Amino acid sequence: MKIIKTKKYINAFLNVLKERALGSSQKIEQRVKAILDDVRKNGNRAVLKYNRAFDSLKVKEFRIKPDEISRYAGKADAKVVKALKLSSRRIRAFHEMQKEESWSFSEKGNLLGQIIRPLERVGVYIPGGKAAYPSTVLMNVIPAQVAGVKEIAICVPTPKGEINPYVMAAINLLGVKEVYRIGGAQAIGAMAYGTETIKKVDKIVGPGNIYVAIAKKLVFGVVDIDMIAGPSEILIIADDSANPAFVAADLLSQAEHDEFASSLLITDSKRLADAVDKEVEKKLDKLNRKEIIRKSLDNYGAIIITKDIKEAVRFSNSIAPEHLEIMTKEPMDVLSEIKNAGAIFLGEWSPEALGDYSAGPNHTLPTGGTARFSSPLGVYDFVKRSSLLYFTKDGFAELAETVKTVAVAEGLEAHGDTIRVRQGLSIHKPDKSQII
């Protein structure tokens, strides 16, 4: 891995990461827009066309029926199903803690409050193709179920008709019955606009490739989305007390996602930097996805040496990583200085992989620096809030003159007249000079 020591080269590398986060080319965006427009206008016909073109699917029925889900789920290894069940219980227990309640308070007979209601219908995109992700099913469906969403529709690509038994096992475990064999931008379009077969949803969640990410961006406003997820990333802050083998393993685990994943170690220890670099090289050749890992590390991986851990924290906060591991002698002391991160893993026994699968917190996290202003997927993403207002006649009278004054100041005479008419006054155009 690159070992960077000087500020000039550190800043140059951080600029590389920023460029990586900026997104896609205009050509890809135009292609995605054309697919979305086609699906919006032509519904099932367009979906079938893209299924044939991109996934070599000739079947006209793209619903995976419940008995088919169960049949494929039955092919999954029992040990894996057991692991999914345990993970499911932990994820559900964690997300139960996120539930919000409606609230209200009384003020001289007036009532003010907030009503929490679940979204009616949600679409979940589950990636498929090079790899299959049953954990993504758990992480995206369970919070919606905990929130009380009544209808959940899942789209999952099945290239050349291959249905992954582990994805079906996760879907079966959660009891979701509405599943479609559709991938890519056409799946996002189908869920956003609806087709003759698929009823449109209120929100789309779930990760995907660049085409899926752009499609979600383009349909936002027609429906809500969780986030525009970019390539995955890990940043490790470590001091001389860290185990080089642990650090190297965790960096490699993130790099194996794809060529655009970023793995970054920031440390104040040259000894650790050199030891981790050697461990990475030693482990790399033994891994099946070593070519992908090598490209990821060459382009977006680095070991940065800082003067102290405080400087490491400053770099981390500016990067706002998706996954942040803190492997220092006193990780709790470092935690108090962390401002921006999707998920924070404290200590050497908290590898990022725990969060990916079984710990409980959600693994759908903000990427590309968006942890500066956004949060992990949670139950709160599947509810909507309505403000509640009830005023008595006396309560109305107490605020009437205040409201009229502000309405006049803003030049919105009809707003003021909603007050005047209730006061039994004639409707007229106010004289702004009265409040100057």
Image: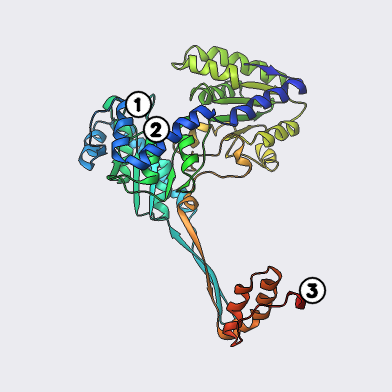
Compare residues 354 and 231 and report the one nearer the observer: 231
Residue under label 2: 184
Q: Amino acid at mark 1?
A: Phe
Q: Which residue appears at 62% of the width and 29% of the height?
A: 236
Is 227 drawn above or below residue 279 in the view shown?
below
Tag 1 near tag 2, CB within 8 Å: yes
| Quarter residue 54 falls in | top left
Instruction: Give the residue type that dot 2 points to.
Output: Gly
Question: Residue at label 3?
Answer: 436
Sequence-first tag of 3 and 2: 2
Looking at the picture, which amino acid does disc 3 mark?
Ile
User: What residue appears at the point 68 percent right and 27 percent down from the top-left corner?
Assistant: 14
Q: Is residue 364 above or below residue 98?
A: above
Residue at 39 percent across and 40 percent down: it is 189
**Residue 62 appears in the figure:** yes
Label pair 3/2, CB-CB below 8 angstroms: no
Q: Indicate left or right for 100 with 130 as reference.
A: right
- Quarter of the view holding residue 58: top left
